[in-house]
């Protein structure tokens, strides 16, 4: 919103026309430009939010453009200069700050986290900063803890409140180094480590050691919700009837795992640095791209704030971000010195998929052929609800217009019983044994889901009454109230509206959004408490509530 409001007469041409927000002298080919325009055509409107995209080859933009509006209220279009909330792309900048602080002698990547945050419980084994950087610490995700405690993520949550919530957790999800488990707690705590070790908040340390040296003038860690950010765009989501709703929170000021503000133009300088380092000492790039195997030797493709994998045969380094109405993606092909930056301000956007479509255009001759459809892969055969007993996670595969869809992602068939998610890189494999269909999901070299298809479970009102009552969690400082209303079991947590619980299997109910309540009791059927599980990979495990009455 840093630009003046354009005249209505020029608005449509400015947003959708080929000359807006691009450097003609840096273009490779008009045909490539038109290909990118087709990828983003659905956003090139004066009444829709959209995306800003930058295509970088050998350290320079070959294409940069805005599609859609940065502010529907003010009539300001998106451009490569627009400042977006970046979501989890912030993690690579937090990781960079830790590496630079280590090079300057403030800390070591192999230090125990309790050296800097002694208030954390002693879990019986040390957790190193390196394990936190690679998401192998076992710490539960504080965003999930906020959600299941009945608090509103969009409210202000001071660092002291979040530290209290994290410190209350008396157990890890697993022994450090045993598993990869993406957790925002890791990077939130790393931001606090930077502050305590260097005596500078992450905002200041990153500005002095990353943003200013690289000339990223419009990039900052947003840790103060009262600060004016020139050029910041609003985030949007679709409401009832298709109208756009403002979906952003100026209250959110948590940094480390997120909290970064940046633009397409600024991210050019960050991308250049991966080929010609200007930061720190000689270890910087090596540490940023290093992978750390799990304790059993299994590969972990998560480096420092980057997933290191392949796309159609070419190595890539990638991370996406999502919060409120913002969706972002940074996709780098190191061997080709080629990067796509896609920043969107509407929650329905799929920037990872859009980045890949752009890469398909520019790297067509170097990419392996896309997987061809497999005859006989009938999505109806695999559609249904699948439940994993280990993580207590319920997922639905749906058949839509001849496609198999998982959580909004259209899966591509690669074999008769195997599908790929081109956006996340996950692979879904179906098998049938004893008349039961099973699904397994592999992601980042790890089996993240293995469940069986289940039928709908009906529980009558008499049986549901046994679960009603008040439940209290000391670790979350939260209370759940369950009541039987019109034949349904209803959950109330904090000031949130009541939620209808859906039975999955005996003594287990889905809250929605990947959240499951598992009730515990004695052999006589008396309910004494419940445990909360959340996430594909068990990001929240065994959060215990005791029944008070």
Image (spheres, rainbow, N blue to C red):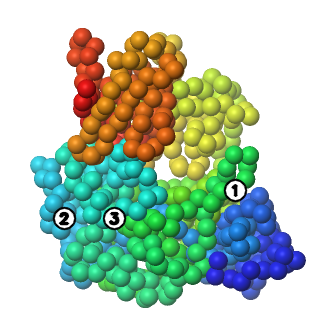
| In this rendering, the label closer to the viewer, 3 or 2 | 3
What is the spatial separation of the Cα atoms under label 1 and label 3, in whole angstroms? 30 Å
Q: Nearer the viewer, residue 406 or 243?
A: 243
First in sequence, mark 1 or 3: give its number: 3
Q: Which residue is depicted at the point 44% across and 88% down?
A: 212
Q: Quadrant of the N terminus?
A: bottom right
Residue 264 place in picture, x, y as percent: 59, 75
Q: Which residue is depicted at the point 61% across and 42% down?
A: 408
Q: Which residue is depicted at the point 25% across and 20% down?
A: 521
Which residue is identified by label 3? 158
Which residue is identified by label 1? 244
Mark 1 nearby-residue class (10 Å; few <14, some 14–19, many ≥20): some
Q: Nearer the viewer, residue 365 or 160?
A: 160
Mark 3 nearby-residue class (10 Å; few <14, some 14–19, many ≥20): few
Q: Which residue is depicted at the point 24% across and 57% down?
A: 164
Residue 473 place in picture, x, y as percent: 26, 40
Q: Nearer the viewer, residue 309 or 481?
A: 481
Task: Point out which mark residue 233 bears.
Answer: none
Residue 326 place in picture, x, y as percent: 57, 61
Left or right side of 179 for 1: right
Q: Quadrant of the C terminus?
A: top left
Which residue is identified by label 2? 117
First in sequence, mark 1 or 2: give its number: 2
Is residue 391 positioned above or below 206 on the image?
above
């Amino acid at each position: 919103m840093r630009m003046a409001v354009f005249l209505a007469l020029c608005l449509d041409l400015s947003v959708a026309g080929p000359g807006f927000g691009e450097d003609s002298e840096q273009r490779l080919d008009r045909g490539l430009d038109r290909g990118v325009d087709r990828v983003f055509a659905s956003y090139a409107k004066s009444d829709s939010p959209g995306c800003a995209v930058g295509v970088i080859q050998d350290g320079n933009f070959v294409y940069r453009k805005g599609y859609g509006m940065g502010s529907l209220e003010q009539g300001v279009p998106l451009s490569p200069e627009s400042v977006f909330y970046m979501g989890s792309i912030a993690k690579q900048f937090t990781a960079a700050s830790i590496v630079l602080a280590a090079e300057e002698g403030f800390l070591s990547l192999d230090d125990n986290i309790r050296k800097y945050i002694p208030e954390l419980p002693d879990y019986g084994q040390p957790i190193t900063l390196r394990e936190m950087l690679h998401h192998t610490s076992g710490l539960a995700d504080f965003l999930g803890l906020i959600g299941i405690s009945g608090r509103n993520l969009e409210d202000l949550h001071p660092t002291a409140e979040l530290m209290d919530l994290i410190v209350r957790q008396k157990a890890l999800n697993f022994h450090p180094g045993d598993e990869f488990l993406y957790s925002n707690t890791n990077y939130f705590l790393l931001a606090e480590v930077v502050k305590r070790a260097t005596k500078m908040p992450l905002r200041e340390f990153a500005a002095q050691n990353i943003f200013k040296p690289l000339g990223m003038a419009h990039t900052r860690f947003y840790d103060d919700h009262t600060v004016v950010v020139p050029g910041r765009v609003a985030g949007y989501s679709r409401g009832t009837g298709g109208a756009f709703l403002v979906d952003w929170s100026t209250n959110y000021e948590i940094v480390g795992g997120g909290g970064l503000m940046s633009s397409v133009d600024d991210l050019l300088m960050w991308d250049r640095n991966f080929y010609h380092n200007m930061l720190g000492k000689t270890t910087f790039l090596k540490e940023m791209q290093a992978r750390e195997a799990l304790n059993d030797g299994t590969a972990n493709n998560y480096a420092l704030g980057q997933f290191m994998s392949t796309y159609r045969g070419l190595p890539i380094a990638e991370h996406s971000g999502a919060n409120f109405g913002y969706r972002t993606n940074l996709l780098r092909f190191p061997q080709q010195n080629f990067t796509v930056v896609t920043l969107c301000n509407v929650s329905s956007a799929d920037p990872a998929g859009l980045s890949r479509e752009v890469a398909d255009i520019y790297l067509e001759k170097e990419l392996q052929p896309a997987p061809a459809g497999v005859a006989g892969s009938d999505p109806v055969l695999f559609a249904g609800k699948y439940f994993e007993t280990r993580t207590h996670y319920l997922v639905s595969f749906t058949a839509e217009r001849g496609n198999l869809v998982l959580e909004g992602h259209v899966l591509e068939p690669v074999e008769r019983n195997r599908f790929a998610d081109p956006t996340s890189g996950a692979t879904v494999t179906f098998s049938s044994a004893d008349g039961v269909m099973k699904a397994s999901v592999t992601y980042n070299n790890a089996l993240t889901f293995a469940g069986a298809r289940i039928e709908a479970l009906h529980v009558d009102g008499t049986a549901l009454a046994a679960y009603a009552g008040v439940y209290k969690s000391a670790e979350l400082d939260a209370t759940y109230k369950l009541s039987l209303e019109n034949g349904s079991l209803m959950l109330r947590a904090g000031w949130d509206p009541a939620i209808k619980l859906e039975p999955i299997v005996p003594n287990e109910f889905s809250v929605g959004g990947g959240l499951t309540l598992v009730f515990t009791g004695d052999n006589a059927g008396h309910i004494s408490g419940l445990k909360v599980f959340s996430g594909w990979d068990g990001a929240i495990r065994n959060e215990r509530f005791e029944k008070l009455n």
